[in-house]
Image (tube, coloured by chain):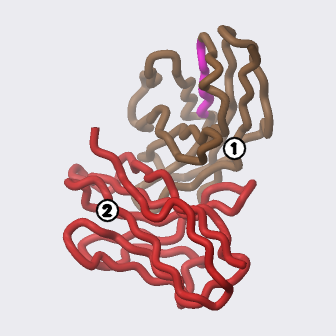
Chain colours: A brown, B red
């Protein structure tokens, strides 16, 4: 079964600094999607960024970018110019054609003023 | 921008009672999902629904659970006889899936279910 591992339960970063959240996954599939979702204190699940495995170029969305290393099965999220509103739980998630979304346990990010 | 909506935002019920959680997926989406998140834990898949039938379900989705799309807009999750351990946040999600089995799932704001 596919698994997603987030090895950092908690992280903190100073406002305006850059932080990287780690995620690794395990699959034998070649075609899949990877996601980062943000869950603020309201507990709503908000899509941050998506990466298709067949794309070599790393996805970017404004201040958010990923480092996708397919061979290493690694999918880290970089947040640049961190803002107080970035404080949230961040979940890494995996999906392939036969598997619904599988989530990691999450990383709690605190942005400190 | 279209979004998934869920009602109610918070539901409190007595153990053994039936509850129905409601979701309105994004209108042109074809695939619908329910997930749950017990407080402090990760999000877990419950069931997916496509073309008016369940396409996949997890071990969690036992006979106490059922899903239905009663009309063209609503998608419901019913828990027949709630247990204390059903207390969780329940998320509905939908995906367009127009181009194949892989597509982004968009989540609703969740319903917090508390079983007393």
Residue A14 lies, with reference to residue A53, above or below; the image says: above
What residue is at 33 percent from the left and 53 percent from the top? B95
Residue B74: image location, x then y, percent: 30, 69
Place residue B40 in its image quadrant.
bottom right
**Label 1 crowd (10 A; few <14 / some 14-19 / many >=20):** many
Residue A53, label in figure: none
Q: Do the residues labelled 1 and 2 touch (CB within 8 Å)?
A: no
Left or right for A22, reference B92: right
- Quadrant where the N terminus of chain A sits is bottom right
- Quadrant where the C terminus of chain A sits is top right
Identify the secondary structure beneath mark 1. Answer: loop
> Magenta span has A105?
no
Left or right for B9, reference A108: left
Q: Mark 2 points at which residue?
A: B31
Left or right for B9, reference B89: left
> Magenta span has A76?
yes
Name the chief secondary structure element in magenta.
Answer: strand
Pinpoint the chain carrying mark 2: B
Residue B71 lies, with reference to residue A69, above or below; the image says: below
Residue A87: image location, x then y, percent: 66, 29
Residue B17: image location, x then y, percent: 59, 88
Residue A66 lies, with reference to residue A106, above or below; the image says: above
What residue is at 60 percent from the left and 47 percent from the top? A43
**Label 2 crowd (10 A; few <14 / some 14-19 / many >=20):** many
Identify the secondary structure beneath mark 2. Answer: strand
Pinpoint the chain carrying mark 1: A
Residue B51: image location, x then y, percent: 24, 73
Q: Mark 1 points at which residue?
A: A106
What residue is at 51 percent from the left and 81 percent from the top? B19
Q: Give the range drawn in magenta.
A: A75-80
């Amino acid at each position: 079964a596919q698994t997603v591992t987030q090895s950092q339960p908690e992280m903190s970063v100073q406002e305006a600094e850059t932080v990287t959240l780690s995620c690794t996954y395990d699959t034998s599939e070649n075609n899949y999607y990877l996601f980062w979702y943000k869950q603020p204190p309201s507990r709503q699940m908000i899509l941050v960024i998506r990466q298709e495995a067949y794309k070599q170029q790393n996805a970017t969305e404004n201040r958010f970018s990923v480092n996708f290393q397919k061979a290493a099965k690694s999918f880290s999220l970089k947040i640049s110019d961190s803002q107080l509103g970035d404080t949230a739980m961040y979940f890494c998630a995996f999906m392939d054609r036969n598997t619904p979304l599988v989530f990691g346990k999450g990383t709690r990010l605190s942005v400190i003023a | 921008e279209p979004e998934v909506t869920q009602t109610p935002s918070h539901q409190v019920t007595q153990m053994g009672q039936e509850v129905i959680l409601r979701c309105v997926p994004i209108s042109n989406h074809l695939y619908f999902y329910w997930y749950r998140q017990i407080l402090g834990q990760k999000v877990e898949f419950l069931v997916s629904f496509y073309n008016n039938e369940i396409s996949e379900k997890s071990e969690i989705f036992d006979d106490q659970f059922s899903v239905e799309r009663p009309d063209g807009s609503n998608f419901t999750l019913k828990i027949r006889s709630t247990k204390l351990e059903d207390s969780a946040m329940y998320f509905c999600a939908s995906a367009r899936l127009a181009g194949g089995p892989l597509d982004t799932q968009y989540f609703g704001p969740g319903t917090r279910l508390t079983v007393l």
